[in-house]
Image (tube, helix red, strand yellow):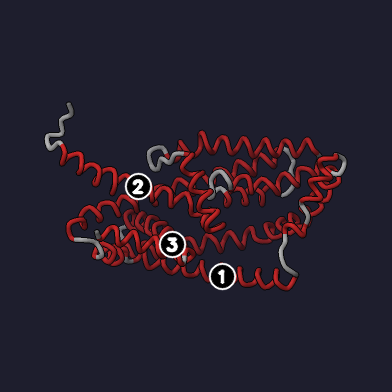
Amino acid sequence: MSLVVLFATLALVLILVPDVLLVVFAGLLLGVFFSGGGGWIARHTGVARGWGIGAFVLLIILALAGAFLAFAPAVVEQFNQLLDQVPAALDRLRERLHEFSWGEDLMRRVTPGALLSGGTEGTAATAVATTFGALGSFLIMLIIGLYGALDPTTYRRGLISLLAPSVRADAEDVLGKATGTLGNWLVAQLMAMAVVGTLTWLGLWLIGVPLAPILGLIAALLAFIPNIGPIIAAVPAVLLGFSEGPTTALMVVGVYLGVQTLESYAITPLIQQERVSLPPALIISVQLLMGALFGLIGLALATPMAALGLTLVKEAYVRRYLGSEAHAEDPTGRSD
C-alpha cells in the first residue's frame, strides 16, 4: 500500500509540476556523477569520501577553466563564424531549391513567419526568461547534486522511511541497484560522447568542412540524446557542406551516418557491454513520449529515466512481486 501511495504521489507531481520533478531527477543524476567520481578518488587515495567528492568537483572546475582559457578564443571565433556562415548557407540552399518546382512549394510552406511566433519584443522577452530559467534550473540541479552526493544516506533513509517496514529491506536493495544503473549509464554515455565528438571532428576535417572542431563539439554534446541528438547536430554541418558544394554536403551526411552507425552498433555496445542494456525501441518510444510531454529537457532525460524505470520494473515488480506470487503458487519451485 505504501508503494502505491508513493508512486501515486510521484505521478501527481509529474502531472501538476513536471518541470520540478525533471529538474530534481537531473540533480540526482548529477549527484550520481559526483558520487561516482568522488568515490573513485577516495578509494584510490585513502581520503574520506566527502574530501574525494570535493576534489572531484575541484578537478572539474579546474579542467573547465583550463579548457576555457586554452580554447575559448578559438571556439568563440569558430562559433561566430558558424553563426555567420549558416545563414549564407541557408540562402544558397534556398537558391538551389528554387530551381525545382517542389522546392518552391517547400519554401512557400517553410517561412520565417511559420517558424517564429509573436513580435520581436515577445521573442526577446521569452529568450531572456528562458535564459534565466535555465540558469536557475541548472543552479538547483547543481545544489541537489552536491547535497545528494555528499550525504546520500540521509536522503535514502528518508525515502525508505516512507515505505512499510515489510518492504524496506527490498527497497534498500532496489535503490542500490537503481543508483548503480544510473552510474553505469553515465560512464558509458560520457565515453560514447567523447568518441562520437572525436570521430565527427576527424571525419569533417578530412573532407575539408570548415569549423570541424566546433561541429565535433556540438556532435559530442548532442550525443547525450541518442538517436535524435545526432540528427540535430548534423544540420549545421550539412548546411556548411552545401556552401562548399552538393558533393561535400553528401560527404558530410556520409560522415554523420558512419559515425552514428559506429556509435549504435560498435561504440555504445562495446562501452556498455553488460553495464546497461536498453532495447532501442524502448528508448525511441520513451524519447518521443518525454519530448512530446516535456520538451527538450524531457528528451534529454528520456534515456536515463528509461534505464531507471526498466531497473525498477525488473527488480521491484518482476523479480519481487511476480516472483513471490510464483513461489506462493509452487513453494517447491517445481514445474509440471
Choose between 173 and 147: the one closer to the eye. 173
- Is the residue marked by circle 3 packed among few (<14), some (14-19), or many (20+) residues within 10 Å? some
Q: CA distance from mark 1 to mark 2?
A: 32 Å
Residue where numbered disc 3 is placed: 14
- Disc 1 or 2, which lies upstream in sequence? 1
Q: CA distance from mark 1 to mark 3?
A: 19 Å
Pinpoint residue 180: horizontal percent, then vertical percent: 34, 50
Residue where numbered disc 1 is placed: 133
Tag 3 secondary structure: helix
Pinpoint residue 280: horizontal percent, then vertical percent: 48, 39
Quadrant including the C terminus: top left
- Identify the mark at residue 201; answer none if there is no mark: none
Pinpoint residue 172: horizontal percent, then vertical percent: 25, 56
Kindly identify the amino acid type of the residue bearing the numbered disc 1. Answer: Gly
> In which image quadrant can residue 5 be found?
bottom left
Assess whether mark 2 and mark 1 are in contact (beta carbons under 8 angstroms): no
Tag 1 secondary structure: helix
Instruction: State whether residue 48 appears in this view.
Output: no
- Is the residue marked by circle 2 packed among few (<14), some (14-19), or many (20+) residues within 10 Å? many
Pinpoint residue 127: horizontal percent, then vertical percent: 66, 68
Choose between 52 and 277: the one closer to the eye. 277
Residue mark closest to the camera, 2 vs 3: 3
